[in-house]
């Protein structure tokens, strides 16, 4: 299974960015998908995750109400819509996959950098 995130870039505070993560080589609709981020000099942190059919979602407190996760099983892609961006959201954003909601993530993709300037 391969995951490839895209959509990052340099934006200003208050702007929006939409990230995508394309999955290949597996059965996308069977995976719980998640987004994580790692800011410079910090540990990787959970951002959001979505269940296999998109009926269940969870968010980190720091992004709830600003970020929205979604998925399109026909396109084998998970998305992260990021609104009202803040400089503190600057990080490399990565997607990941796992088999069940409670499991640990065991498949990771390369990230995409989002830089938010003040």
Image (tube, grey):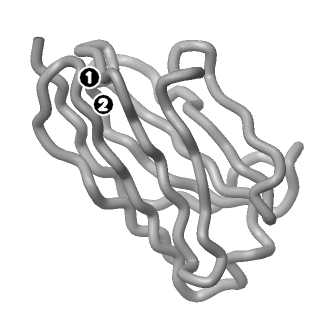
Find residue 91 and name its label: 2
User: In whole angstroms, how far apart are the C-alphas of marks 2 and 1?
Assistant: 7 Å
Q: Earlier in the sequence, mark 2 or mark 1?
A: 1
Identified at 50% across, 53% down, the residue is: 95
Quarter of the figure with the N terminus: bottom right
Query: Do labels 2 and 1 touch, CB within 8 Å?
Result: yes
Residue sitting nearer the eye, 78 or 68? 68
Identified at 49% across, 32% down, the residue is: 67
Residue 87, horizontal then vertical, whole percent: 23, 15
Q: Quadrant of residue 109?
A: bottom left
Residue sitting nearer the eye, 55 or 116? 55
Looking at the rendered structure, the number of numbered marks drawn on it comes to 2
Q: Quadrant of residue 21?
A: bottom left
Q: Give the secondary structure at mark 2.
A: strand
Identified at 62% across, 14% down, the residue is: 61
Residue 69, horizontal then vertical, whole percent: 58, 46
Identified at 48% across, 69% down, the residue is: 3
Q: Give the secondary structure at mark 1.
A: loop
Residue lying at the far bottom of the rendered structure = 25
Residue 59 drawn above or below residue 102: above
96 left or right, relative to 56? left
91 left or right, relative to 31? left
Bin the neighbour count of mark 2 within 10 Å (Cα to Cα): few under 14, some 14-19, many 20 and up.
many
Find residue 40 and name its label: 1
Residue 56, horizontal then vertical, whole percent: 82, 46
Residue sitting nearer the eye, 92 or 62? 62
């Amino acid at each position: 299974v391969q995951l490839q995130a895209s959509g990052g870039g340099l934006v200003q505070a208050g702007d929006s960015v939409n990230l995508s993560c394309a999955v290949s080589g597996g059965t996308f609709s069977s995976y719980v998908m998640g987004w994580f981020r790692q800011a410079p000099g910090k540990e990787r942190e959970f951002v959001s995750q979505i269940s296999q059919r998109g009926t269940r979602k969870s968010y980190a407190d720091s992004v709830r109400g600003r970020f929205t996760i979604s998925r399109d099983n026909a396109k084998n892609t998970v998305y992260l819509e990021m609104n009202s961006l803040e400089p503190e959201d600057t990080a490399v954003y990565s997607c990941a996959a796992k088999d069940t909601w409670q499991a640990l993530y065991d498949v990771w993709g390369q990230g995409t950098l989002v830089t938010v300037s003040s």
